[in-house]
């Protein structure tokens, strides 16, 4: 059993990891699928444990064994082979790569922060606080969407359409045609 710790001093770390891995990481993943297609986004995002191990090595000063290094190399090669489609020219969208990087960094950061916090809290406490942070992050997104009078149509789901009220158009132009379509749909929904 672990000794008593300053719970208030460490509770925010697993909650932060839940926000990074949940709403931020998953949003990056879904948007990378939208812009890169599942054929590239899924195998490339599966490299997040490799990045998490590298972050642990750099930040937490954890050692990486030769076996783990071999496994990481094998994971990189396997992911690259899965992403290659014979006869099709690679069509990497810059927005998709940015969202893929956000996904990988979010999921990797979740692992590193959780591992660091488990040095002072039990795994169950860290897991619970991670879930609380993730849940609060998703609830915040839903609250913002609700306050923006976002029309919810379960049969016409578009993740970029959901993201558009959360991000001001002047700051980030994710996909102008999609945003225009989302605005038209919102206007049509209001008119009905």
Image (cartoon, rainbow, N blue to C red):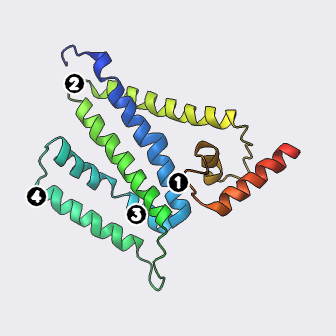
Residue 52, which numbered label?
A: none
- Judging depth in this view, the residue of 189 and 56 nearest the camera is 189
Which residue is drawn at the image coordinates 55% and 53% (left, top)? 172
Q: What's the distance in space between the residues labelled 2 and 1, CA to CA? A: 33 Å
Tag 2–tag 1 contact (CB < 8 Å): no
For the C terminus, the image quarter is top right
Which residue is drawn at the image coordinates 34% and 67% (left, top)? 79
- Using the image, determine if residue 83 lies above or below residue 136: below
Q: What's the distance in space between the residues labelled 1 and 4, CA to CA? A: 34 Å
- Using the image, determine if residue 5 lies above or below residue 142: above
Q: Residue furthest front?
A: 170
Secondary structure beneath label 1: helix
Q: Residue furthest top?
A: 4
Residue 8, image x, y percentages: 32, 16
Which residue is drawn at the image coordinates 44% and 59% (left, top)? 98
Which residue is drawn at the image coordinates 45% and 40% (left, top)? 22
What residue sits right under mark 1 in the picture?
A: 30
Residue 30, image x, y percentages: 52, 54
Residue 43, which numbered label?
A: 3
Tag 1–tag 4 contact (CB < 8 Å): no
The picture quadrant where one finds residue 112 is top left
Secondary structure beneath label 4: helix
Disc 4 or 2, which lies upstream in sequence? 4
What residue sits right under mark 2 in the picture?
A: 120
Residue 182, image x, y percentages: 71, 53
Q: Specify few, some or many for label 1: CA neighbours under 10 Å numbering under 14, 14-19, or 20 or more.
A: many
What residue sits right under mark 4 in the picture?
A: 66
């Amino acid at each position: 059993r672990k000794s008593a710790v300053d719970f208030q001093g460490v509770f925010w770390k697993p909650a932060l990891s839940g926000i990074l891995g949940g709403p931020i990481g998953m949003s990056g993943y879904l948007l990378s699928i939208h812009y890169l297609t599942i054929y590239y986004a899924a195998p490339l995002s599966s490299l997040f444990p490799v990045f998490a191990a590298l972050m642990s090595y750099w930040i937490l000063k954890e050692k990486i064994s030769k076996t783990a290094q071999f496994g990481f190399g094998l994971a990189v090669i396997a992911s690259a082979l899965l992403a290659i489609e014979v006869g099709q020219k690679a069509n990497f969208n810059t927005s998709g790569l940015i969202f893929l990087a956000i996904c990988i960094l979010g999921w990797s950061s979740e692992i590193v922060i959780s591992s660091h916090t488990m040095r002072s809290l039990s795994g169950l406490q860290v897991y619970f606080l991670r879930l609380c942070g993730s849940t609060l992050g998703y609830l915040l997104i839903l609250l913002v969407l609700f306050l923006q009078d976002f029309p919810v149509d379960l049969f016409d789901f578009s993740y970029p359409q959901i993201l558009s009220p959360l991000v001001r158009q002047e700051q980030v132009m994710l996909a102008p045609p999609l945003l225009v379509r989302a605005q038209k749909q919102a206007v049509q929904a209001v008119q009905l």
